[in-house]
Image (cartoon, rainbow, N blue to C red):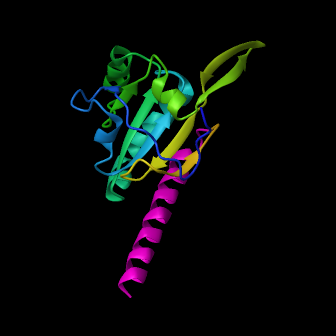
Amino acid sequence: MAKIDIGSKIKNCSIESTNSKKKKLSNYLDKKLIIYFYPKDMTPGCTTESIEFNSNLNKIKRQKYNIVGVSRDSIKSHEKFIEKYKFKFPLISDPDEKLCKTFDVIKEKSLYGRKYMGVDRSTFILDKKGTIKFLWRNVKVKGHVDEVIEKIKELNKWILFLYFLLLW
């Protein structure tokens, strides 16, 4: 699989989401999309990251973005995670790693000297056509959500600038 980067277009694919009405990734592209990949429900870093996205959901929505989290956990695990922390956005279950592999987030990791393949915490910003506009890999949780919000504001300013430039 070719490495994806800014400018890559993501192919539409079937998904299993806690929002049962959305069966394809493109269903989330009625607006621009923030899609973040995390290793595991209910773990400290993943919980902190998801809580911070949830706490900033109004800021994200004001910028006309949808948000969705993705891990290899089951829908049942995601539903417990959402219920416990009152998340107001959906999570995608990717146990077969189809979406993780599409976004190239499965990486070799090491824990106590044991090597294994796991999800590299990553965030992607997509436009309505499924083109990657920005991405972060190997994300550190502290300050990341603020960085994402600043980037979507910056991207929206560029869109407005180009729109007015075309009108002029």
Residue 53 shows up from this direction: yes
Is 88 or 16 nearer to us in this picture? 16
> Is 14 within the magenta?
no
Residue 5 in the figure: left or right of residue 114: left
For the point 51% across and 21% down, the residue is 40
For the point 56% across and 46% down, the residue is 144
**Position of 136 relative to 46 (above/below):** below
| Quadrant in the rendering for residue 12 | top left
Q: Give the overall secondary structure of the magenta segment.
A: helix
For the point 26% across and 30% down, the residue is 19
> Is 141 within the magenta?
yes
The image position of residue 64, as x and y in percent, is: 33, 56
For the point 59% across and 45% down, the residue is 136
The image position of residue 115, as x and y in percent, is: 73, 14
Residue 143 shows up from this direction: no
Boundaries of the magenta span: 140-168
Residue 112 in the figure: left or right of residue 94: right
Is 35 or 27 nearer to us in this picture? 27
